[in-house]
Image (cartoon, rainbow, N blue to C red):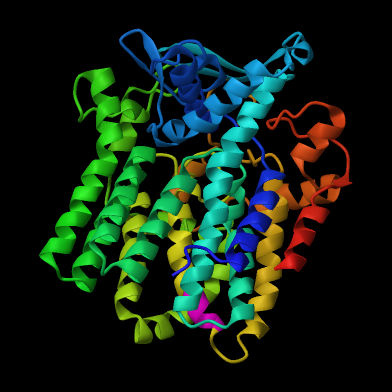
Amino acid sequence: MTLINKTEIKIFLIFWIIYIFHAHWVGWAEFASYDLTMSISNEKRFEIDSYYNNTGDRSFYKEHYYSNKNPGASFINILPYSTLKFWYSVLPISKYTENTIVWQEDVRTVTEYGESVMYFVVNPRIFNQLAQWFSIIFTTAFISAFSVVIIYKISGKLKLGENKRKLICVAFGLGTMIFAFATNFFQHAFGMFAGLLTFYLLFTRGNKLLYQFLAGTVLGYAIVSDGNFFYLVFSFIIYHLIKFMSFRKISLFSIGIVIGILPLLFYNYSIFSSIWQNIYYYSDPTVRSDIQKEFGFNLPNLFLVYRHTFDTYRGLFIFNPILILSFLGFPLLFKEFKKEAYLVIIFYLFQLLFYSSFNTDFTLGASFGPRQYLPSIPFLTLPLIMFLRKEKSMILFLPLLILSVFINSVLSNFDWETLLIDNSKPTLLVKRGYQEKATNSFETLRNPLTEWYTPHFFKYGLKSRVIDGIITKNINLKLQHTGFSIHSLPFFGLLIFL
């Protein structure tokens, strides 16, 4: 059996190129992971004391600053960062790096514990520009493009015709939040990829013991990327017991999970001399003084269930309308692949109930759409594949596909909305009473798609920050260049080669 054929290589390259040239840098969450990569590569330590002032997503423990993110994304990024660092040092590029760095205040926070100011560099030196771009190219963009290939493979196993298999690749890779998080350095893409790859290995090669172990290892590393991904583990253990009912296989799968988690345990022990501490709990109180509340949970909130699904502000099915058709395809999935249908139900319900039980911040952080639900998209794509097998499915599929691609591959390229932030006060994310409304009513809050992103589209066009940066000789992926352009169009044109 060929690991990857010519069609799959072509699919991978097309989506990878599209993701590469739409890369952009959002801010705090990415810097938190990137800073840890720099500290490990440059200073051989986990403290980010040399870099902490570019992010509010930081922790403070025993007089040192740390990233408040799990280290999985940072560990994977060490190889591309260190490779670039080596070649940059031996090539004659240094003469282009002599610009005077300009710092600009990004956010100022005030809590009862003090004041903090975060900055970003307006004109980063060439190495830093390339390093941030490489952090996306060889991590999130790479694994997201490979995820499209896995979806293509799975669609064949689900008996979808060849032309429709390519359409499902477009729907998954460009018509969902997969695109938005393939083009930046958030850790959520790693959880998505880990869940999808684990499913593929179990679904297609689960009868081989080696793949049971590999699937477990991949799944365990999802926890290294983000501790919230524990629901991935619970869901797959239930699926494994339903599908295989084998002590030997579940044992190898479980051993793989434990081995996959080991890098996180080593990281925790290096900082706390204990494997059970969580770095997020020590988030810098001068930035966030309410972090401890996020470790508390209530019963699932019905209003939050609505906010995370069909609300205009961050509803999963509002930002990914193509996934609405998954409901129509689910009966066929249940009929022909009952065990996999159980996995979809268990996984999505676990996730929905978990995030609708949070005590604070219904928005779940800065995001294009509900970023925490990114790992559920591959599983919701399974019934979407089954829907496409139906006669006359294209009548509904094509209009929603066009709308979904416009939302996710065009609108997500602009600066992410800040509609609920009170910029008149020097505090972090001061919601104007929205938290209370969100958790106690079905009242409509704001609609970023119509109020923010669509007006930006008419003002700025089809943006590619990379191409804009090359033209202006400043590839600052955090900087949105002004002026109307259609630089994205040629890259989307690559789809004709599918």
The verdict on residue 310 being magenta is: no
Residue extent of the magenta highlight: 383-388
In the picture shown, does residue 265 fall above or below 319? above
Residue at image x 67%, y 85%?
Answer: 395
Which of these two is toward me, 202 or 229? 202
Nearer the observer, 459 or 154:
154
The part of the image, by quadrant, that contains residue 127 is top right
Q: Is residue 310 visible?
A: no
- Work out whether 19 lies above or below 293: below
Numbered-mark total:
0
Tell me the residue at 23%/23% (across/down). Answer: 269
| Residue 349 lies in quadrant | bottom left
Tell me where residue 193 appears, x and y as whole percent: 45, 52
Location of residue 401 with respect to 309 vertically, above or below? below
Q: Residue at x 38, y 18 (%)?
A: 46
Residue 72 pos. (x, y %) = 40, 36
Secondary structure character of the magenta stretch overall: helix
Quarter of the picture containing the N terminus is bottom left
Quarter-wise, where is residue 366 in the image?
Answer: top right
